Amino acid sequence: MGGRAYGTIEVRVDGGVLTAVFGAPPMNLIGPEVVRDLVGLIEELEAPGGPRVVVFESADADFFFPHVDMTKVAEYTAEAAKAGGPGDASLGMLFRRLSLLPVVTVAKLRGRARGAGSEFLLACDLRFASREKAVLGQPEVGIGTPPGAGAIQHLTRLLGRGRALEVLLSSADFDADLAERYGWVNRALPDAELDGFVAALATRLAGFPRDALIAAKAAVNALTLPAAAEVRADAALFQQLVRADGVQHRTAALFRGGFQTRGPLELDLGAALADLPPVD
């Protein structure tokens, strides 16, 4: 690694394992600063001779990535475009690039990962969640648009049609145990055991031959990753509908209730969506 400094990611390297800790106060929203840093980190991880394993976690116990910053969609999209050019100006294509990295990516989940936060986790190779502290959700349909950064593709492949539709259409929050049962995460573990389990697994994998890790991952990716055209289509639909009047009305109602602040609405967003006034 080149030792690049990041404003929202603390990077630690121990042998063949790199730990990347996201910290973007006040609540780890995915905004332009986070996307800019993630683009830079992905570029570093694509270079030869880096770590074999990357562990992603959050410095915020309540929020891994709660969702994107809805006030800065154009700005974070512009930052994502720097990873692939204007034709790939989307989080979906940035996250697909994450999935293609020649390293094993492991997400360690505490707190809430909703919307693009969940889609970031889905782009990682392995996901492990705190039984007591992890919450996952895809709230987009409840706001007025289908997800646009990979959830439709990944959840359908992982969960099957019926459970994927339940997650996407309900826009509800899911705890770690149900997410494990559905296949959204690899395992739900007691919070006291999560750090040790992930550290032991990351160290174990980092001791294996790099070529074998990369080859096995590439073979699985070839069978399971969505095609770039599918990701682009989802992103285009999201970017079209997120500007619609219905979305604007519902997000305005959410902001009046405390959206994007550290309060009850964000802690229980799945329930809050059901209380919004109905729209056509």
Image: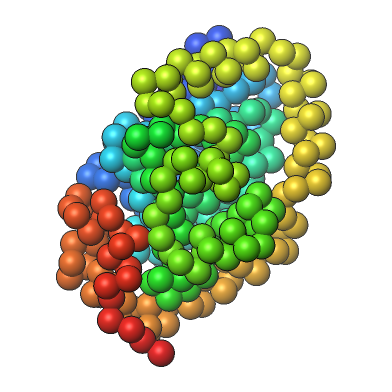
In the rendered image, the quadrant that contains the N terminus is top right
Classify residue 133 by image quadrant.
top left
Query: Could you tell me which residue is drawn at 53 percent across and 63 percent down?
Result: 166
Is residue 212 in sight in this rendering? yes
Query: Residue 171: x and y, percent?
Result: 43, 64
In the rendered image, the quadrant that contains the C terminus is bottom left
Query: Could you tell me which residue is drawn at 75 percent across and 57 percent down?
Result: 227
Q: Nearer the viewer, residue 110 or 85?
A: 110
Total labels drawn: 0
Query: Residue 67: x and y, percent?
Result: 38, 54
Q: Nearer the viewer, residue 96 or 279?
A: 279
Classify residue 123 by image quadrant.
top right
What colouring method underlies this structural image? rainbow
Q: Is residue 163 left or right of residue 258?
A: right
Query: Could you tell me which residue is drawn at 63 percent across and 36 percent down?
Result: 125
Classify residue 151 by image quadrant.
bottom right
Q: Nearer the viewer, residue 267 or 262?
A: 267
The extreme bottom residue here reads 280
Query: Residue 186: x and y, percent?
Result: 58, 35
Q: Is residue 259 left or right of residue 99?
A: left
Q: Is residue 99 above or below residue 53?
A: below
Query: Could you tell me which residue is drawn at 51 percent across and 21 percent down?
Result: 198
Query: Residue 272: x and y, percent?
Result: 28, 65
Q: Is residue 178 left or right of residue 235?
A: left
Is residue 65 in sight in this rendering? no
Q: Is residue 278 above or below residue 135?
A: below
Q: Is residue 245 left or right of residue 124?
A: left
